[in-house]
Image (tube, rainbow, N blue to C red):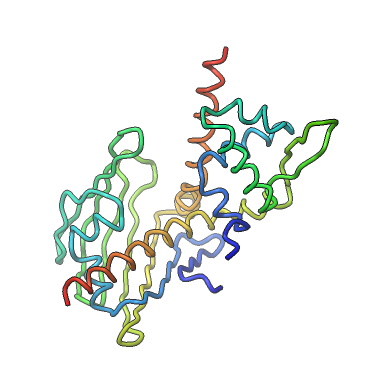
Amino acid sequence: MNLRRDVFQAIADPTRRAILLLVASQSMSAGAIASNFDTARPTVSKHLQILTECELLKQEQSGREIYYLINAKKMKEVADFIEPFRKMWDDRFNKLETIMKKYSRQSR
Amino acid sequence: MEQKTKINAEDGKQELVITREFDLPLELLFTAYAESEIVEQWMGTKVLKLENKKHGSYQFETTDPKGNKHGFNGVIHEFVPNRKITRTFEMENAPFGVQLEFLEFEKLTDDTSKLNMHVIYESVAQRDQLLQLPFTQGINMAHNRIQNILSKLK
C-alpha cells in the first residue's frame, strides 16, 4: 500500500491544499506554516510529511531550520484539471458500490 | 492498478463520457439510480423529488459545510429499467447552464455491470468550467480560509 504517495490523495484534503497555497508564494518553515492554522502542530507536521512524501513539497535546510517549498514540476502534474473531477465521480461510484453490496445482502 | 472510473473529455468538444465498471449485478446498479433513499446515500444529497418516468422530473438539495443549500434539478426524458436513463441536469443559481445526460447500463457478467454516462453541455467553455470546479472550489475554499485567518491577525 502506497496511498500516501498518491498526489491526488494529498490534494484531496483542504488543509493540505491551503498549505500548498501558502508555500506557493514563498518557502516557509514548519513553524511559520503551522501558525497559519488553528489545527494542532503535530497535525500540520503530518500534512507536511504527506506533501513531502508525494513530492509536492521539497525540503531545504537553512541553518537550523528546514524550509518547505513547492515542487513546481510535480504541481504541474496535478494541474491536469480532469483528475479532481474524475476523483469526485470515482468516490461517488465507490460509495454506490459499497451501499449496493450491503443492500443486496440485506434483501437476500 | 487500472482506474475503475474513466473520463474521456476530448479537447474542444462540448461533451464528455464517464465510464465505470461495478462489482454489482446490473439490477443492483440500476436500483441505485431508481430509489430515492439510495440516491440520497451515494450522491450525498437530499432528494426532494424523483419521478423516474418519461415526462418526470427530479429535484435534489445539498447542504454545504457552511449550511448553505444548493439546488439541482432536471427532467427525465427516458427511463428504461436496467438499460437507459435520459435526463437533463442543472445546478440552480449557477452560471453553468443545463446539461443533457445519457446514462446507459450494461450487463457484463452475472455479478458485474457497466455504466456509460454521456454528458453534453451547451458550450465547450461550460464543459471546461464544470470540469475544473472540484479543483478550483477546493483551492478557493482554502484561500478564503487563509484570508480569514490573515485578516484576523491584522
Q: Position of residue B148 (x, y in %)?
A: 50, 23
Viewer-proximal residue, A47 or A23? A47
Viewer-proximal residue, A76 or A17? A17
Q: Which residue reaches farthest top? A: B154
Q: Position of residue A6 (x, y in %)?
A: 60, 58
Residue B146 vs B132, above or below: the answer is above
Horizontal side, residue A27 vs residue B6: left or right: right
Residue A49 vs B11, above or below: the answer is above
Rendering quarter of residue B106 = bottom left
Viewer-proximal residue, B108 or A101? A101
Q: Position of residue A29 (x, y in %)?
A: 72, 31
Viewer-proximal residue, A64 or B42? A64
Q: Which residue reaches farthest bottom? A: B109
Task: Please name the residue shown 84% across and 33% down the image.
Answer: A62
Task: Please name the residue shown 56% across and 54% down the image.
Answer: A8
Task: Please name the residue shown 59% across and 26% down the image.
Answer: A36
Q: Position of residue A30 (x, y in %)?
A: 68, 33
Rendering quarter of residue B115 = bottom left
Residue B91 vs B82, above or below: the answer is above
Rendering quarter of residue B77 = bottom left
Task: Please name the residue shown 56% across and 48% down the image.
Answer: A11
